[in-house]
Image (cartoon, helix red, strand yellow):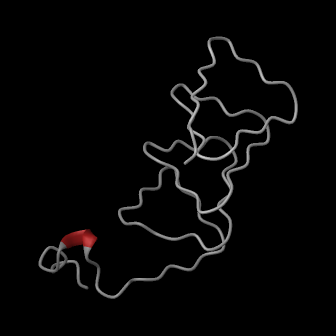
Amino acid sequence: MSNQTWKKYGGINKPDMYQYLTVSTLVADQLFIRNLFTIYQTLHVTNNAIIDENIISGKNINAGVNINASGDINAYGNLISYHNAYIYKDIYKYIYKYI
């Protein structure tokens, strides 16, 4: 694509035939991804990962230290504690009759 015709073909959002990028190391100050993509193995984040919406997992989510929630935690199965469980307010017990 020549320097004179890049606007004609859609600018930098539609390059000619560049669809794949293979590198061994990528260093960037910022990385923006416009479309959904799939990670087939492991995504390792060294410091913080900030996710603005939902985390959806088909299997387990494991935390090495703490899970802090500023809203509700909903468990649709069992809630199991292998050590102490501290409740700072009331526990509401709902009794369902099985038919």
Residue 69: quadrant of the picture: top right
Q: As rendered, which of 43 and 61 lies closer to the eye? A: 61
The percent position of residue 58, horizontal first and vertical second, equals 59, 63
Q: As rendered, which of 3 and 21 lies closer to the eye? A: 21
The percent position of residue 5, horizontal first and vertical second, equals 15, 80
The percent position of residue 52, horizontal first and vertical second, equals 44, 42
Count numbered badges in the picture: 0
* Residue extending farthest top: 89
Give the side of residue 68 with respect to residue 99, left or right.
Answer: right
* Residue extending farthest bottom: 17
Residue at the location (50% across, 79% down)?
Answer: 21
* Residue extending farthest left: 8
Q: Is residue 81 above or below residue 15?
A: above
The percent position of residue 13, horizontal first and vertical second, equals 26, 70
Residue at the location (41% across, 66% down)?
Answer: 36
Give the side of residue 66 with respect to residue 76, left or right.
Answer: right
* Residue extending farthest front: 99
Q: Is residue 66 above or below residue 47?
A: above
Q: As rendered, which of 92 and 56 lies closer to the eye? A: 92
Give the side of residue 98 with respect to residue 37, left or right.
Answer: right
Quadrant of the snapshot with the N terminus: bottom left
Give the side of residue 32 with respect to residue 41, left or right.
Answer: left
Residue at the location (69% across, 43% down)?
Answer: 78
Q: Is residue 15 above or below residue 30?
A: below
Q: As rendered, which of 51 and 7 lies closer to the eye? A: 51
Residue at the location (25% across, 76% down)?
Answer: 14
